[in-house]
Amino acid sequence: MEVFVETERLILREIIPGDVEGMFELDSDKEVHKYLGNKPVTSIEESRKTIEFVRQQYIENGIGRSAIIEKATNSFVGWTGLKLVKETVNKHTNFYDLGYRLIRKYWGKGYATESALASVKYGFQTINLSEIIGMADIRNFASQNVLEKSGLKFIETFDREGVLHNWFSILREE
């Protein structure tokens, strides 16, 4: 199991099959999915498939989302990090997207921002990216705040499958 980054309070590492219960707690919560299309998972098997999907991204793309582990308790908090998006979104293809999703009991602790900042640093310093993108439903002010605190700047609003989203970007030079 590879550890990608450590911060003061968090370990960011590969998502592994043993994370399935935490992934299910995360993705079965309707409130977590409020701005993600309101499609929470309903079975642990769906969470297993999500983990397999992420692990396949590690193989195919050399990168994928990372598990967030709270150092103090060794608890699964959620996921964060960069993902190569190969399909076209907002007229862009093959870009690196910064994302994060936390189990609700960990909201409000600054973990999303801490992990996102570490992911941006990892993207520029370790894998030598030139740009990192972020996007969020225009109603998801908390997520937009994390993107901005992580150094991404608002670029434009766009329609994503009938839902308005804001597009953010940061360049390595910034």
Image (cartoon, grey):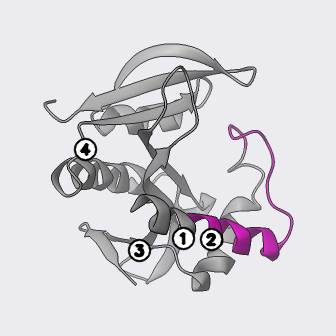
Q: Mark 3 or mark 2, which has the lower sequence index?
A: 2
Q: Which image quarter is the N terminus in?
A: bottom left
Q: Amino acid at mark 2?
A: Ile
The residue to which callout 1 is attached is: 55
Residue 58 visible in the current orientation: yes
The residue to which callout 2 is attached is: 51
The residue to which callout 4 is attached is: 129
Q: Mark 2 or mark 4, which has the lower sequence index?
A: 2
Tell me, yes or no, whether the two marked residues, 1 and 4, touch with CB atoms within 8 Å: no
Q: Is residue 167 shown above or below 67?
A: above
Q: CA distance from mark 3 to mark 1?
A: 21 Å
Query: Is residue 161 found left or right of 102 in the rendered image?
Result: right
The residue to which callout 3 is attached is: 70
Q: CA distance from mark 3 to mark 4?
A: 27 Å
Q: Position of residue 26 (x, y in %)?
A: 66, 63
Q: Mark 3 or mark 1, which has the lower sequence index?
A: 1
Q: Nearer the viewer, mark 2 or mark 4?
A: 4
Q: Position of residue 153 (x, y in %)?
A: 33, 24
- Extreme residue toward the right, this view: 42
